[in-house]
Amino acid sequence: MRRRMLSLRGGMFEVEVLEEGDGPQLLYLHGIWDAGEQEFLERLAARHTVIAPRLPGFGASTGERQLMDIHDVIYYGLDLLDGLGFEDGPLIGHCLGGMLAAELAAVQPRRFGKLVLMAPFGLWNAAYPVPDFFSAAPDEVEGWLGRGGSPHLASPSPTRTANVGEEEAIAEALTRAKSTAAAARFLWPLPNHGLAKRAHRISAPTLLVWGDSDGICPPQYGRDFQQLIAGAQLETLPGLGHLPHVQQPEKVGGLIEDFLR
């Protein structure tokens, strides 16, 4: 993928932007564990110009210390949209990026042609609590992700780090720590900042995608989002976990393309 840097607010935020493909623009906001998303983005790039910025604290993007609350996050997202010149195209978000996508679609409902949310955070259901993956051991998080036998690793596992060079293992561990710390600024202590009060404003046709083995964001949240967003479609995919687009990029990419057409 092509990479470039975008400066926002006079350098307060430096954004790493990945781009692929030709055709109508499509904006993708990633999640916490999306390191294996390349095949999925290439699938979408067959018909679109995919724009995939890395959120602050992920990849080469900076400025996460400037985000103190959900309002900071939303206005950062609006500045990002303006900086990218993104208007009227479809918006896709997964996990953490799904939460931001939903917030942006609620704040500026006419800005997006269609909305796809894949296992987004943003709600809280006490009967189906999201686990505390910030304090959990890596192997416990791997179980919650429920990769369903996918060969793609969302993030380096303990087994993998044992099989690579020491310097690479240390670099991967530092990358995971940086991304986790950045995600905590958005999600800790609970991945709930009042989106339920704003979700009724979302007017873009919306597709919700969930794996039925998602142990990070349980499938019940798909039904909760569907009740809040008028006309939302929900696709629950058997045998997949929190990373359906990484586990089965062709299937999920095709599902999204059908919805966008």
Image (cartoon, helix red, strand yellow):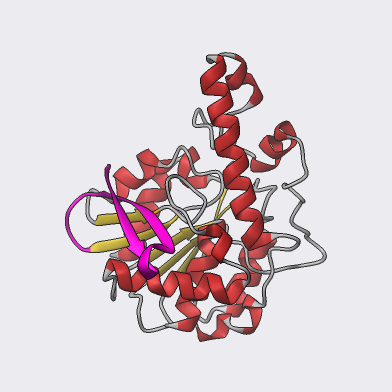
Range of residues picked out in magenta? 1-24
Is the N terminus in the top left, top right, bottom left or bottom right quadrant?
A: top left
Q: Residue furthest left?
A: 22
Residue at (60% x, 31% y) in the render: 173
Residue 181: percent from left, percent from top: 64, 49
Residue 27: percent from left, percent from top: 35, 61
Residue at (68% x, 63% y) in the render: 191
Work out whether residue 5 can be spotted: yes
Q: Nearer the viewer, residue 187 or 202?
A: 187
Q: Is 254 positioned to the left or the right of 229 in the image?
A: left
Whether residue 4 is in magenta: the answer is: yes
Q: Nearer the viewer, residue 186 or 15?
A: 15
Is the C terminus in the top left, top right, bottom left or bottom right quadrant?
A: bottom left
Please determine whether, in this image, residue 179 is positioned above or below residue 183.
Answer: above
Work out whether residue 209 can be spotted: no
Q: Is 123 positioned to the left or the right of 111 in the image?
A: right
Residue 188: percent from left, percent from top: 71, 60
Total number of numbered labels? 0
Residue 47: percent from left, percent from top: 22, 54
Please determine whether, in this image, residue 42 is positioned above or below residue 188.
Answer: above
What kind of secondary structure does the magenta stretch mostly adopt?
strand
Residue at (42% x, 83% y) in the render: 109
Residue at (67% x, 73% y) in the render: 193
Whether residue 196 is in magenta: the answer is: no
Q: Is 70 positioned to the left or the right of 168 in the image?
A: right
